[in-house]
Amino acid sequence: MNKLKFLSLFAFSLMGLIFFAPRALAQETDLSNVSAEFELDEIQAEDLDIKEPIVLPGDSGYWWQNLKENIGLFFTFDEQKRVEKMEQNASRRIIEAKKLSASGTANAADRVSEALTRYQDLMDKLRIKFETNPDLKEKMLEKFDANALRHQEVLTDVIEKLNDKASAEQIQNLERIREQSSLNWYKVNKETIQERLENAIEKNNSGSKFRQIKNIAVLEQLADILPDEAGDQIEAAKVRAEEKLADKINNLSNAEKDEMEKYIDNIAGSRIVKQKMLSNMSEADALPQAIRNRLENIASQSIQALKEEFENMETAEQEEFLEQFENNAHPIYLQLLKEMPVTDDLKNTMNQLRERQEEQIRTQIEQTSDPIRLRNMEMNLENSPALRRQAQEQRREVTSDDQE
């Protein structure tokens, strides 16, 4: 009898190994796949056509590195080659900041600030060079745009890595540098912003099957930084990125959809910007319906998590969180503000933010001539009937004008 029990127990254990071990291994492999794909899509020095920096700000030989760069620029008399070197030096500062932010050293934030202050100075000079030399701008704009998109991605990652290590003042300074570099890039040739973004997206299409999600995340950030007049062009560029993404994720397995969810979760950036990205992608016609359904589910879970986190914050933390909504307006941001639990201490602040969002969204609708963007606004304004009607009327008017 004991022997029979032993054999039964052994058989049961063997069955467990057969059926459950492969699943556990598959889960581990999935995580490994996500890590490998995310690493594959990280911007490296070679992506920016420069060598990996060895000496970093704070190192004893860094002054010599800067001296060599300055001497090299001084003795470069061909204007195009000089500008190319300036662009390479700016990219080197970006990779220096990336390496420093990942180092975990106590003074990393100070050293990153040093690198990015030099980066900002170089980008200012590049903008002036392009403004005063249209022929040079035409020759170099395509590469400049592709690298600028990569720079924005790295800058966002750097800020997130330093968020717990740097002071509030240092983080604000880094965010200011990111915003100013975006505006400088935009001003170089703002009349062709859609074409420039689409070309940059094309250049940044290699890597994993999820690579375009990172590009879309950068476009969502740019939409919050650049003037409203760029909104339609950014929206059109996002559609192009979604089309390229759809080509690679058209037939994902359930395991690959799980990988995509983890990949999105790992993307650096503001939580509310990521929420906006998820909501917009869930409405993207270019993406397969199964992917849109999964994205809608992720967005729903994400907004619920945000609400719960906000509710558990101290009043000072809630005030800091709400500062994100002061300068940027979007239907998703308005939805978030309407769904956030309100305490008596913050009731006036919340009402003012909602009113400001509504006013800015009204202006955005008036200035929008892209029917796709207007349709997305309609969908995201389900809880704001008056604004939703305005978006519907504007879309009908725009569509009518196009038909005529």
Image (cartoon, rainbow, N blue to C red):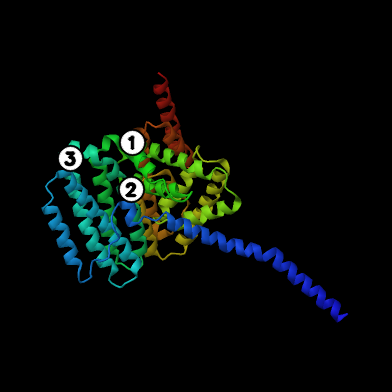
Q: Amino acid at mark 3?
A: Glu
Of 236 and 373, which appears nearest the observer?
Answer: 236
Residue behind mark 1: 195
Q: Is residue 370 above or below residue 348?
A: above
Residue lying at 39% horizontally and 44% vertically, measured from the top left: 330
Residue behind mark 3: 131
Cα distance in 3D space between marks 1 and 2:
13 Å
Q: Amino acid at mark 1?
A: Glu
Query: Horizontal and vertical percent for residue 153?
Result: 35, 53
Q: Amino acid at mark 2?
A: Leu
Q: Quadrant of the N terminus?
A: bottom right
Query: Horizontal and vertical percent for residue 211?
Result: 44, 49
Q: Is residue 349 left or right of residue 14?
A: left
Q: Quadrant of the C terminus?
A: top left
Kind of element beneath mark 1 = helix
Residue 399 in view, yes or no: yes
Is the Cβ of the residue at disc 3 closer than 8 Å to that at disc 2? no
Query: Horizontal and vertical percent for residue 388?
Result: 45, 36
Residue lying at 50% horizontally and 60% vertically, measured from the top left: 308
Asked where in the image residue 392 lies, by quadrant, the reply is: top left
Residue closest to the far right:
1
Of 82 and 315, which appears nearest the observer?
Answer: 82
Kind of element beneath mark 3 = helix
Q: Residues within 10 Å of mark 3 (few under 14, many from 20)?
A: some
Q: Residues within 10 Å of mark 2 (few under 14, many from 20)?
A: many
Is the Cβ of the residue at disc 1 closer than 8 Å to that at disc 2? no
Asked where in the image residue 163 lies, by quadrant, the reply is: bottom left
Label whose residue precedes the other's in the sequence (1 or 3): 3
Residue behind mark 2: 149
Q: Is residue 256 left or right of residue 127?
A: right
Query: Horizontal and vertical percent for residue 175?
Result: 29, 56
